[in-house]
Image (cartoon, rainbow, N blue to C red):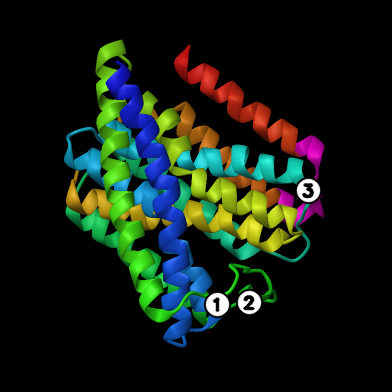
Amino acid sequence: MLQSILLILGGLVGLALGGELLVRGAVGIAQKLGVSTLFTGLVIVGAATSMPEMVASVQAALAGSPGIAWGNIVGSNIANTLLILGASAMVAPIVLIGIGRRDAVVALIVTLLLWALALAQIGAVWIGIGLLVLIVAYVVWRYRHPGAVPLDEEEDHGPPPGGVIAFGLFVVGLGILVLGGDALVTGAIALATLFEVPDTVIGLTIVAVGTSLPELAASIAAALRGKSGLALGNVVGSNIYNILLIGGATMTLAPIALPMELAGLQMALLTASAAGLLALLWFADRIGRVLGAVLIAAFAANVVLIFS
C-alpha cells in the first residue's frame, strides 16, 4: 500500500511540475514564432494545461481501466466548476460581466453530448475522431471570433524564455508529465484493487483532483491578480478541452464505452454545474466568497457521496 501511495504522490508532483514547465515552454515557443496572443492562450496554453488529464486518461484507457480514464474527465470537469471556481472566488470575487457566455454555452452542449454517449454505451474510433474534429472546429471558431475581451489583456505568464530554453522546457515538461501520469495511474489502480474500490471512484476523485492541480493554481493566481476573465476562462476552456480533446483522444486510442456508473448522478451533477455556471454568466455580475464557499461545499458533499 505504501508503494501505491508514494506512486500517487509522486505522480501528482510530476503532473504539477510537468504542467508548469510545459505551459512556460509552449508560451515561449508561440511567442518566438510570432503566433497571436489569442491563438497562444486558446490553443497552446489551453491544450498544454490539459496535458495532465490527457496523459492520465489515455494511459488509464490503454491499461484497461476505462473507469479511471472517463472518471478522470468527468471528475476533472466537476472539480473545475465547483472546487477550482469556488476556491478562486474565495480568494477574490470573480466579476462575470460580459465574459465567457458563448464558451459556457459550448461547455454545456458538449457536456450533454458526453452524457448522451454515456447513456448510449457506444465506444468507437469514429466517435473519438468526431470529438477531435469538434475541438478543431471550436478553436477555429474562437480564433475567428475572439469576442469583446481580448486574451492579451487577461494572460500574464511573465517574460517569455528564449527559443532554445522554451523548447527545452516544453520537452522536459512533456516527459515529466508522461512519467507522472504513468505513476499516478499505476498507483491509483493498485490502490483501487487493494481496497476493492471501483476504478470509476478513483478516477472521479484522486486522479481527477490531481490532474486539475495546474488549473487550480492558475485560476487562484489569476484571481489574486484580479484577472476574472483568465480565472473563468481557465475553468470553462478546460472543461471543453477535457471532453472534446481528451475524450476524443481516449476514445480514439481505446474505443471503450463510458462506464455506465457515470451516466447517472455524476453526469447529472456535471450537467447541472455547467447549466448553473451559464445561468450565473447571464444573470449575475459576480461570484462572491459566499457562493464560492457553496461551490466548494457542493464538491465536498459529492466526494463524500461517491465514497459512501
Disc 2 packing (10 Å; few <14; some 14–19; many ≥20): few
Height in image: 299 above or below 251?
Answer: above
Tell me the CA gap for discs 1 and 3: 25 Å
For the N terminus, which image quadrant?
Answer: top left
Circle on res. 38: 1
Q: Amino acid at mark 1?
A: Leu
Residue wearing tag 3: 92
Query: Does label 1 or label 3 sit earlier along the sequence?
Result: 1
Q: Secondary structure at mark 1?
A: helix
Pointer 2 with pointer 3, Cβ within 8 A:
no
Q: Can see residue 251?
A: yes
Camera sees residue 284: no
Indicate whether residue 289 is drawn in magenta. Answer: yes
Q: Amino acid at mark 3?
A: Ala
The residue stretch that appears in magenta: 280-291
Query: Are circles 2 and 1 on residues that touch, CB within 8 Å?
Result: yes
Whether residue 107 sits left or right of residue 176 in the image: it is right
Residue 152, disc: 2
**Rendered position, 267 above or below 307:** below
